[in-house]
């Protein structure tokens, strides 16, 4: 079924992307920057939770579908790319970091599509290093969106910057891992 509960949750995550971006276009007399940061962070966290929720609901209701398996990673990539572009505009993330993460997402998506066409999709299935990269991103991005607050001795921007740089390194490592897994099938 195309529009089952898990797919609707995934689609809602895609709808949240313009909301995160749009928050920062609101006039300053409508929302102060600190409020925009909090609102964007909350929306991003909601999107991240919905990523877990759609998979849980799909398994729980036995509504795993090919469309959902396609749409879920697309939604994940779009929300991360949207947030990174906002963070780049706000000068909270370095361009090289955003380029590494966005470029890897495009490259690995293309690699997976190609491997599926040659019947080797399982050889580039999600690996632990990819999950570690995602966790690092999903913690770093809300910290960078939140920006202003301190958590005890740690500032959100500082911790978010450390984690997004870790995510960039893991991004390169995971891309090399997937390329290495695909290389034996390059002649196919």
Image (cartoon, helix red, strand yellow):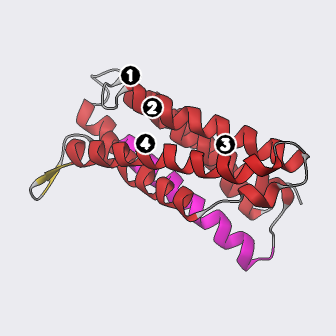
Whether label 1 touches label 2, CB < 8 Å: no
Q: Residue 21: in sight, yes or no? A: no
Q: Which mark is residue 89?
A: 1
Answer yes or no: do the residues labelled 4 and 2 have beta carbons within 8 Å?
A: no
Could you say which disc has been placed on residue 98 in the image? 2
Q: Earlier in the sequence, mark 3 or mark 1?
A: 1
| Chain-order first, disc 1 or disc 2 | 1
Among numbered discs 4 and 3, the one appearing first in the sequence = 3
Residue 184 locus on image (x, y percent): 78, 51
- Marks 1 and 2 sit apart, C-alpha to C-alpha, by 11 Å
Specify which label sits upstream in the sequence, 2 or 3. Answer: 2
Please give the label number shown on residue 168.
4
Based on the picture, tell me whether residue 52 belongs to the magenta stretch.
Answer: yes
Q: How many angstroms separate mark 4 from mark 1 (CA)?
A: 18 Å
At a point 89% along the width and 60% down the height, the residue shown is: 1
x and y percentages locating residue 65 in the rendered image: 84, 62
Query: Looking at the image, do the residues carrying marks 4 and 1 touch, with CB atoms under 8 Å apart?
Result: no
Q: Residue at x 73, y 70 (%)?
A: 58
**Which is closer to the viewer, label 2 or label 3?**
3
Is label 4 or label 2 in front? 4
Identify the residue at horizontal 28%, vertical 22% (top origin). Answer: 28
In the image, the segment drawn in magenta is 39-62
Q: Are marks 3 and 1 in contact (CB under 8 Å)?
A: no
Q: In this figure, which residue is indicated by the disc labeled 3? A: 108
Q: Do callouts 2 and 3 mark residues in contact (Cβ within 8 Å)?
A: no
């Amino acid at each position: 079924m195309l529009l089952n509960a898990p797919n609707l949750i995934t689609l809602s995550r895609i709808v949240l992307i313009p909301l995160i971006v749009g928050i920062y276009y609101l006039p300053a007399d409508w929302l102060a920057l600190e409020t925009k940061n909090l609102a964007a962070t909350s929306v991003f966290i909601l999107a991240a939770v919905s990523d877990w929720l759609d998979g849980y609901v799909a398994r729980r209701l036995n509504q795993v579908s090919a469309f959902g398996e396609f749409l879920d990673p697309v939604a994940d990539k779009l929300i991360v790319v949207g947030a990174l572009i906002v963070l780049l505009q706000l000068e909270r993330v370095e361009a090289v970091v955003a380029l590494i993460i966005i470029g890897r997402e495009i490259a690995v998506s293309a690699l997976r599509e190609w491997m599926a066409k040659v019947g080797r999709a399982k050889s580039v299935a999600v690996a632990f290093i990819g999950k570690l990269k995602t966790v690092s991103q999903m913690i770093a991005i809300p910290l960078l969106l939140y920006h202003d607050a301190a958590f005890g001795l740690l500032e959100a921007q500082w911790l978010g910057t450390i984690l997004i740089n870790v995510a960039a390194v893991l991004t390169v490592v995971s891309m090399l891992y997937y390329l290495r897994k695909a290389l034996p099938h390059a002649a196919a």
